[in-house]
Image (spheres, rainbow, N blue to C red):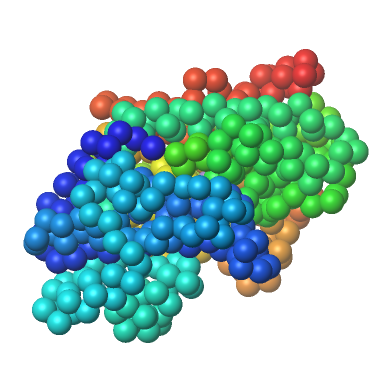
Amino acid sequence: MFSKQTYINRRQELKKLVGTGVVILFGNNESPANFPANGYYPFRQDSSFLYFFGQQRDGLIGVIDIDNDIETLVGDDIDIDDIVWYGSVDSVHDMAEQVGVANSAPMKTMKTICNDAMRNHRKIHFLPPYRHDIMIQIFDLLGIHPNQQKESASMDLIKAVVKMRSTKTQEEIDELERAAVIGYKMHTTAMRLTKPGVTEKFIGGQVDGIANSYGSMVSFPTIFSQHGEIMHGNPSMAELQSGRLVLCDAGAETINHYCSDNTRTYPVNGKFTDRQLSIYKVVEECHDQVLQLARPGVKYADVHFAICRIIFNRMKELGLARGNTEDAIAEGAHAMFLPHGLGHMMGMDVHDMESLDQINVGFDEETRPNLEQFGTNCLRMGRRLEEGFVVTDEPGIYFIPDLIDKWRAENHCADFLNFDELDKYKDFGGIRIEDDVLITKDGCRFIGKDRIPYHPQDVEEFMKNN
Ligand SMILES: [Mn+2]
């Protein structure tokens, strides 16, 4: 938890930005795995609730009556049955005090708060819910059916939260640095353990254990797969095979729930083949190029397309693509190789604030998403960068057999792609290199003091010596 003053200041700023009405920030409830008392562990608080109210317990709601300047932490104190099984925790009154909230109230008060506000036709602001139990709570309290809740969520509140959470303060950057330290341990452990005959699942499990040991949990389900061409390939029982590449995309959350998100791709036997290296070097070039391009005022969509151009040009040199690069990118031909965006915001959520809808987070009135074109529609962050933003830099090149077959059958982008050559890469897999970038006053820098090895020579050396 940050200092009391941090949360007071954040709520003060939120009140100014939203202006009027009653803000209700729902904390998360326990999420049962197979029966009510057996929840998914660890409990994960909602990030926006955490940002403004700081408390990690389940079953809490934060209420801010802007017009009357009354803040209330709502929740029931735990009873003796819970204390027997889980131990004692602070009272809701004490938890409110810890984050500078003057009032606390039991959960049944929510009905009165909401009824009063509705009777007086006051604006009630809530964020779009993503958990079904919260949807039921909103239905009970405000009478809004779950199907209408996304539309009924407050755009004023969404905009205020996005504005505040997008720019990371120094204490948040320190947290992100701590997450990077755990991320480094996760990735270097995976590299150390990688050798022919070990299962993907074993290494994935070891990586997860490090996140649990040093922080609170993984920041997203660990990807560790020899099928790097599957974007979210979870670790399988397959054994690692000499001659193949393995892709590890993993990150940690600190105790205060700030994230890391890195990807490395390396040869199972510790030595790249020439063919692997020819593709790897392109991804490496793209990854490093972002450091030269990303700075305040630059649209991340422009950085994305600069990277797409590099990839397409290099694929032409390798005989996998052809034609005019600008025309090819306008047609979306580059998505054969890079079917996702260059990166996303990162903070308390690994895809920061994604529950508030990417169009509100990564785009604005000036920069609109292209939702039609395959690949480009996955760009999560397009708008102009600002000092204090944290985005991921994650270019990749993938050879997806089904995509190659589909585009060939449909003659899609046939003027720009050499399908006969692409066929030869169907057993290649995919490569992604990812680091987290902090936008500074006049440029950007990677988060994390120790760089997880990614230059081919560093990777080979590390794997040889460890
Ligand atoms: Mn990422």
The residue depicted at 61 percent of the width and 60 percent of the height is: 39
Q: Position of residue 51 (x, y in %)?
A: 34, 47
Q: Quarter-wise, where is residue 66 in the image?
A: bottom left
Name the outermost residue toward the front.
Answer: 80
Residue 145 lies in what quarter of the image? bottom left
Is residue 381 toward the left or the right of residue 364 in the image? Answer: right
**Which residue occupies the foreground of this view, 430 or 90?**
90
Where is 395 relative to 142, above or below? above
Q: Position of residue 397 (x, y in %)?
A: 61, 45
Front residue (pair 188, 320): 188
Percent of width and height locating residue 132:
48, 73
Q: Position of residue 92 (x, y in %)?
A: 36, 53
Q: Is residue 326 above or below residue 296?
A: below
- Which residue lies at the image location 36% right of the left edge and 75% below the top edge? 138
Residue drawn at the location 61% of the way across and 54% of the way down: 85
Instruction: Decide: is 269 above or below 227.
Output: above
- Residue drawn at 25 percent across, 61 percent down: 63
User: Would residue 182 appear left or right of 10 to someone viewing this image?
Assistant: right
Q: Is residue 92 left or right of residue 309?
A: left
Q: Quadrant of the N terminus?
A: top left
Does the image show residue 377?
no
- Which of the pair 140/380 is nearer the observer? 140
Residue 401 visible, this angle = yes
Q: Looking at this rendering, what residue extends furthest in the left direction?
A: 67
Q: Check the picture and name the quadrant holding the C terminus.
A: top right
Image mark count? 0
Quarter where residue 135 is shown? bottom left
Does 153 sit left or right of 71 as displayed? right
